[in-house]
Amino acid sequence: MKRIVLLPGDGIGPEVVREARACLELLSDGCELGLEFEARDFGGVAIDRHGLPLPAETLAACQGADAILLGAVGGPKWDGARERPEAGLLQLRGALGLFANLRPARVMRGLVHLSPLRPELAQGADILVVRELTGGAYFGEKVLEADHASDLCAYSRAEIERIAHVAFAAARRRHKRVTSVDKANVLATSKLWRQVVGEVALGYPDVTLDHLYVDAAAMLLVTSPRRFDVILTENLFGDILSDELAVIGGSIGILPSASVGAAPPALFEPIHGSAPDIAGLDIANPAGTIAAAAMLLGHLGRPDLESLLVDAVESTLADGCRTADLGGSDSCSEFGAETRERLKERISARDAHLALIAMNRGCCG
């Protein structure tokens, strides 16, 4: 039995999580996964009901889970409030030790025309950003005065080493190339970053490493995206570059992300926001959340089922079932239903293939 904690959150979060959960339930029942689901309040809805974005009960449930699936948090309703929904996400990452953010981005088949890049540039782009998530300027000491402000950016050798190992290990499962992004011509933290990443690379002789300054990387992402495989970078740079990268595929509604630490559980979510202006209208794109659920399956040791679900999503998109953000007219629930129909077909084909293998082994035995 695997416990999955669901954090639907705010805005369109409950809608997209509903569709992703249904896909996971289908796989759990059809492939005997034994997934068990538990939904908890998180973000703005938790502030409204409990006074805090991360109630103690929610944190305890997450700490006892095998994996967590998040929808989205935040919205103008809580602007200026004493408690912010986004604070719950930072607290959760800290409590679970989630120091690495993995954000894949690629141009899916049949959608190259939606990319703002020319087809010859976008076609075949497939990049994974590995972003350090708990250090740097976002977590350093902050000073804000009437005529002076500062944000301390600090990294330790240990923090850089652990995120570098994540990137190199990921590259071994992909195309064995890591591009480390820094600003070592200006920043002391980047000088240490470059030095330590180079040292870690010695333990991965099968992986090619190169270094880029962040401004050069930002340019090359839109002029030559296929040169990249795995991008390794610090918190601030990773935040900016991964959002830049998100547009290459045509919509932020189709991309997932994962936040992982040294031990379970990991957190999976789409990269889009809560979009409160379309909440409850059944027009949100659930593809990113379903793709996040696929990443969750891979994390649980079932890359075969991850591939099945990703293929079902891509097939749905390629054959023209698309929500409004992709120029279509299908609803959130219609897209989810169509994806599950394709998933059923793939489960049936998989079962037939396994049965044939078993029969052949029996005949040969």
Image (cartoon, helix red, strand yellow):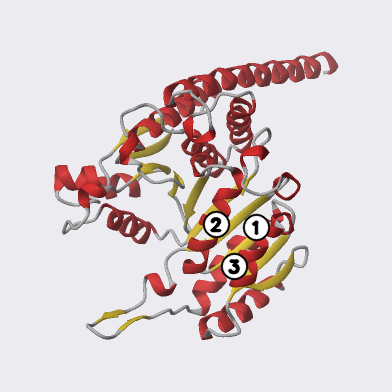
Question: In front here: 356 or 96?
Answer: 96
Q: Secondary structure at mark 3?
A: helix
Locate the C terminus by quadrant.
Answer: top right
Whether residue 155 is visible to the viewer of this picture, yes or no, is yes
Q: How many C-alpha atoms fall within 10 Å of the one at disc 3: few (<14), some, or many (≥20)? A: many
Mark before the other along the chain sequence, 3 or 1: 3
The residue at which mark 2 appears reads as 244
**CA neighbours of label 1 inside 10 A, class few (<14), some (14 to 19), many (20+):** some
Give the Cα separation between the discs numbered 3 and 1.
Answer: 24 Å
Where, quadrant-wise, is the N terminus in this rendering?
top left
- Residue of label 1: 222
Looking at marks 2 and 3 on the same chain, the residue that comes earlier in the sequence is marked by: 3
Give the amino acid type for the residue marked by disc 3 in the picture: Ala
Q: Check disc 1 and report its element: helix, strand or loop.
A: helix
- The residue to which callout 3 is attached is 164
Q: Residue at x 48, y 20 (%)?
A: 337
Q: Residue at x 45, y 63 (%)?
A: 133
Q: Amino acid at mark 2?
A: Glu
Q: Say if residue 228 shows up in the picture.
A: no
x, y percent for residue 257: 50, 48
Quarter assignment of residue 318: top right
Between 230 and 93, the one lying in front of the other is: 230
Q: Quadrant of residue 96?
A: bottom left
The Cα atoms of the two marked residues, 1 and 2, are separated by 8 Å
In the rendered structure, are the residues bearing label 3 and label 1 in contact, judged by CB atoms less than 8 Å apart?
no
User: Picture coordinates of residue 250 (x, y %)?
Assistant: 58, 42
Residue at x-position 35% and y-position 61%: 94
